[in-house]
Amino acid sequence: MPRSMIAGCFALVAALLATLPPTFAQSKAQERPPLDIVADSLDYFAEKNLMVGTGNVEVRDRGDVLTADYMSVQTETMDVYARGNVIYRRGDNIWRGEELRYNLKTRTGDFGSFSMFFDPFYVTAEDSKRVATNEYVLNGVIITTCEGDDPAVSIHAREARIKDNRVYTKGATFYAFGFLPYLYLPSYSRSLDSHERFFQLVPGYSSRLGAFMLTAYNYRLAENLRGITHLDYRSKRGVGVGQDFVWKDRENDTYNGMIQGYYLNDDDPLRGPDSENRTEDIVDEERYRIRLTHFHEFSDRDFLLADANYLSDPFILQDFFNREYRNQVQPENRVTLTHRGDDYTAAIGLNKRLNDFYENVDRLPELTLDVPRKQIDDSGFYFESRSAASYLERVFPEDPVSGDPVAEDYDSFRIDSANTIYYPTRHFGFLNIIPRAGYRGTYYSETLSSSTVTNTAIVDDGAGNITVTTNTVSSILDEGADLRNVYQLGWEGSFKAFRTWDDYIVMGDGDGLRHVAEPYLDHTFQPRPNLTPDELPQFDSIDTIDKRHDIKLGMRNKLQTRRVKQPVDLIDLNVYTFYRVEKEDDEEDFSEIFWDADMSLVPWLLIEFDGSYDPYESEVETFSTQVSYLMDDLSRVGLEYRYRLDQQSLGGLVIDLFPQDRWSFNSSFRMDFEEDELEEQSYFIRRTGQCIGWGLGFRQVDDDEQVWLQLWLTAFPGTMIDVGY
């Protein structure tokens, strides 16, 4: 018989209504939705109230899907018997077997040998029964994340019960490498919805830390909260313990954060980078760190950002959390609440030093209001503003020997408001002229004045020898509150010129070529304010504002093409300099020549570089570049170089090969060309198997060499422990 589809809402109901009173039939039809049955061959035996399907049989009932080679359904009792390639799906869960006896009303039955997939877990059993809608009773159970008959890691249990996607076992034995038992628990339970609990182990060796074993036990405390407990051992430094709590809104992703605590009784705290600067007054055996981060998006307009770090000494991050140290040498302690309005952005922030061995500008608090450039009604004028009110205190660290601050702390209440009006105009159909006028007012509750006193002393030793000595004493005196006024006038001018070559093919895939040249200038006249920087407490760049009269002269060039009908910049080059209309005695007429360029001649090669050149000394003062070579398989080779005259000449190379393949490799290098020294090199080879992944790493940083091994379950690639180096 050809394949046919019989919707249960017609076939079953029609058969049953033929033998039942109308009112009773209607009530029965309302009790449960009808079945949908599909089969290559489908027969209905009315005298037995039995439907029999053979060949690709599929039954759908209230979201459940049951398929088999053969199936019979008793339409009164709703008992189902299925055999041959039986697959039962409920939501994301999949059960597979060869035979099934099941009741569609009670949703219970005898599943026999059991094989079910709770993404990402595979659960098999020698025998099983479904005793409720979301509850199974199993015997001879194996739980694993590995697909196949011989899993590399697994849990074996005599008995188990699965209820609401959580498994409860009796007599659980944990196996590694398929045959090696390493843990037995009389009872064990875990969720099958997620990777709820797992251990992480990273053994290794460091010439500075000795042999080490880093461990982490991950577990879920609530739907949006998990904990990570660390127990680490380093043979040259001792035992370290840590506790992390990580939270995240898994449903809407409106918040995330963590709190981390770590403690180590260090056997050798004076050993490490910058060891010549370490003394017992700065660092001792009791070493710890506490870190809190949190981001919360209350709405699409309001969000909170918080970051706090409390450290035992200035070297703990460098010693044990080096990757974090490189991202931020001096960690921040701040809280910012921001609101985005239709025409403004307002924020209130706090910044407070928690570690007295750092220098910092405390902001307790700081309120800011930003108004982006916006047209004033229909006048043709535009206005933008940035204002801030802050209580600022500059605090200095203590001298480790004397215990006194290296400089005297000072503070001031400051209100700053910078406001500018623009009037864009266009002339001759191509020339853009934008005059502007600005005023910046800054109120200080404390200002400064300097005083120098020279004392002369005449000493007669009684033998006719007279000595004249002078002693000069400079001091900074606190003055009262004052308002600094900064006025600015200026104008910007620019135009664009184009030339196109429509038939030009660029690098084989670019459609056409266009050159855009944009010369521009920006003239700024800012008279000397009534308060100069030496009369103000210095907190940030706002306090360094002084007179200014210069013209920025620049040329921007772009080469563009079309790829897949979208415009693409092949080259974007901006070159500029400043002509000083008024200059100081030690300044030349022109500043350095600056350049900033982005190049993407082909989609797989990105080049960025910037720098500055001193035309009077005929030498490059700064230069930096980044080159990224991207491949179709997401492999990447990156090159970076940074140069600063007589200060820095650093090069870096990053290689990341075959990141999506079973075997992958990455490596990085950092070279100090000034010292002709390889500062860092690292290599990490990784193999991702069907079930288990492993990686072997080596890193040399300065005089420290490290090697480590990592293992992880491939079902959870994001759970690799961070070795921190």
Image (cartoon, rainbow, N blue to C red):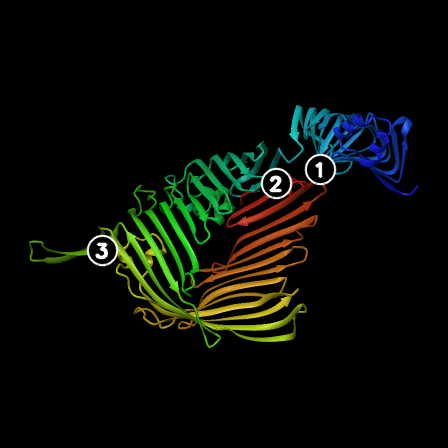
Q: Amino acid at mark 1?
A: Asp
- The quarter in which the N terminus is drawn is top right
The residue tagged with tag 3: helix, strand or loop?
strand
Q: Residue furthest bottom?
A: 428
First along the sequence among labels 3 and 2: 3
The residue at the point 68 percent across, 58 percent down is: 632
Label 3 sits on residue = 450
Q: Residues within 10 Å of mark 3 (few under 14, many from 20)?
A: few
- Give how far across and how far down residue 227 sits, in percent: 55, 34
Tell which of 493 and 685 is nearer to you: 493
Q: Is residue 674 left or right of residue 439?
A: right
- Give how far across and how far down residue 714 sits, in percent: 68, 41
Label 2 sits on residue = 719
First along the sequence among labels 2 and 1: 1
The residue tagged with tag 1: helix, strand or loop?
loop
Label 1 sits on residue = 92
Q: Amino acid at mark 3?
A: Ser
The residue at the point 90 percent across, 26 percent down is: 48
Q: Amino acid at mark 2?
A: Thr
The dot on residue 144 is none
Q: Is residue 503 visible?
A: yes
- Give how far across and how far down residue 556 sits, in percent: 50, 70
